[in-house]
Amino acid sequence: MAIEREYLDVAEKLRERTEEGKVNWRDTFDQNTFVTTLERYSFEIRKLRNAYSLIMKDLGEIELFELDAVQPDPETSPENDRVHILLENLYSWARRIALNVDDKVSDIKNFLDKL
Amino acid sequence: MLDTIGSIASIIGLLLTVWAVVEASGARKAAQQAREAVRLGSAADEFRQLDRLASEFLGYVENSQTEAAALRARDLVTGILAAKERWRRFLTNERVAKLEEASIQVGVISRSLLARKNRPTGAEQMRLLKFSHEIIRIIAEETGTMISESETRNDGN
């Protein structure tokens, strides 16, 4: 089934705003899941064993849509592969923000410089 | 002479009407305040139940009863969402946001535990405790605030 264009647009805009540092992603109990709340909606980006998944919910925990993409291989569709790149990128940014990776790396760099 | 008496009677009538309106609106206001105090009391009761549910959830987590913890977590999500929607008018936006965060976090815990085949490892258990304690803290804080506001309102009535 073709992925709804609108869901992809939302995911793409979410990635853009995340890269701009405008989205506050947060850590969860599941180390491969990060969440954010925007307006009256929440998003969950998850890394699975060989796939990524983005879920949009309303604040009543009702799932509005889910985008999934498996690891590209010769069998997967070009559409899947495009979504995979998008979600992999979004996941990477979400993780970086939620875990405050940049500040921690900068911190240790400063420490190593002074050592 | 009759005109003067008529004018005075009109003024007295008007004053009596104003007095009656003021009295009635005061009574309406008092009744409204009493209704609000009862509702706030109900909200406090619902949050107390939520707090009990959260404590049970934490108990299961602490005793490594993963399946029971997952199910209680699911109940907790439902409870938080219901309380948040029902008593929204007594909550500030900031408090609503905290409850939403708690429901999202507990939702992830519930789903992760239900999907799991094995018991959490030691490190996972520590992580589970860390997130669970934060959820419990939010709910306890909200429950405390709601009870305190209810008591203050009752003392004022």
Image (spheres, rainbow, N blue to C red):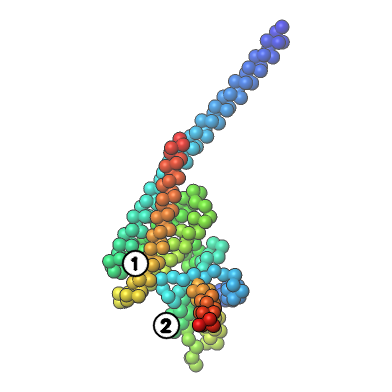
Q: Residue B51: where, in percent of width, then height?
A: 37, 55
Q: Residues within 10 Å of mark 2 (few under 14, many from 20)?
A: few
How far apart, in angstroms, are the residues tagged by discs 1 and 2? Answer: 22 Å
Q: Is residue A57 visible?
A: yes
* Left or right position of B15 against B63: right
B132 in relation to B30, above or below: below
User: Residue A87: percent from the left, percent from the top?
Assistant: 53, 79
| Residue under the point 46% across and 76% down | A46
> Residue placed at 38% from the left, 67% from the top?
B130
Dot 2: what SS? loop
Residue A73 is situated, as x and y percent measured from the top left of the image, at 49, 91
Asked whether the viewer can see residue A94, the reply is no
Give the residue at x 41% y 73%: A30
Identify which amino acid the numbered label 1 is placed on. Ala
The disc label shown at residue B70, or none: 1
Marks 1/2 same chain? no
Pick whichever, A114 or B87, lies toward us: A114
Instruction: Give how far across and how far down residue A106 sits, in percent.
Output: 54, 78
Tell me if mark 1 has few (under 14), some (14-19) or many (20+) residues whose alpha carbon lies within 10 angstroms of its own.
Answer: many
Say above or below: B67 vs B136.
below
- Amino acid carrying label 2: it is Arg
In this rendering, would A62 be left or right of A38?
A: left
